Image: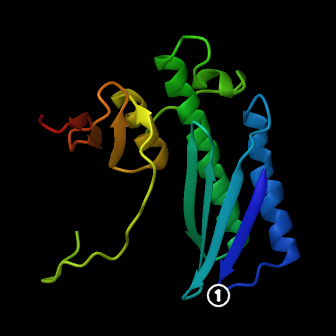
Amino acid sequence: MNYNIRGENIEVTPALREYIEKKVGKLERYFDTTPVADVNVRMQVLNSQHIIEITIPMSQLLLRGEEVHGDMYAAVDNVVEKLERQIRKHKTKVNRKFRQEGSLKYMFKNELEPIEEEGVSSDELEVVRTKRFNLKPMDAEEAILQMDMLGHSFFVFSNAVGGDTNVVYRRKDGRYGLIEPEA
């Protein structure tokens, strides 16, 4: 894995860099082969709160975790635990859903133990952040898995069957919805 570690309002010391690489490197044990991926780490200090965000984009999976703590080393520990839970949760769901050869199921080692799942008030409307991303062709069930992995309440994707842009979302009752364009 290639590490891209940057800090905002904090100096990335060699000791801190080594600690992050050691902790995140332990995630490799969850995969059959060492993933070829970039590990993007963003550290920030705001009002004595240490914020760390780790994003690991892989070919068929996106791991992302963010943690806020009073100590940066403790925040690193917590965010790595989050990423481990994401991997185990995703592996469990993939094993339940996909049984055919060549699916994401075979990306992970088999010894992983499954885990059990557990508005702005302003008169002005303002766009405060814009995100751009590639729409990958997939079916609704795979989009739901990706949405759950990211911890988001919705996910935009390109439908593999028709090629239309669709949205899956988590409803208040805990089930899922799908938004498709009308022809």
Give the x, y percent position of residue 154.
32, 47
Left or right of 59: which side holds 18? right
Up the image or down, 62 lies above or below 39; here it is: above
Left or right of 5: which side holds 137? left
Q: Amino acid at mark 1?
A: Asn
Residue nearest the viewer, comparing 113 with 126? 126
Q: Which residue is mark 1?
A: 9
Asked where in the image residue 92 lies, by quadrant, the reply is top right
Q: Residue furthest top?
A: 100
Left or right of 1: which side holds 88? left
Give the x, y percent position of residue 46.
55, 85
Give the x, y percent position of residue 101.
61, 12
Up the image or down, 41 lies above or below 60; here it is: below
Give the x, y percent position of residue 29.
78, 37
Q: How many marks?
A: 1
Left or right of 154: which side holds 69? right
Query: SS of the residue at dot 1?
Result: loop
Q: Residue at x 22, y 42 (%)?
A: 171
Residue nearest the viewer, comparing 61 with 83? 61
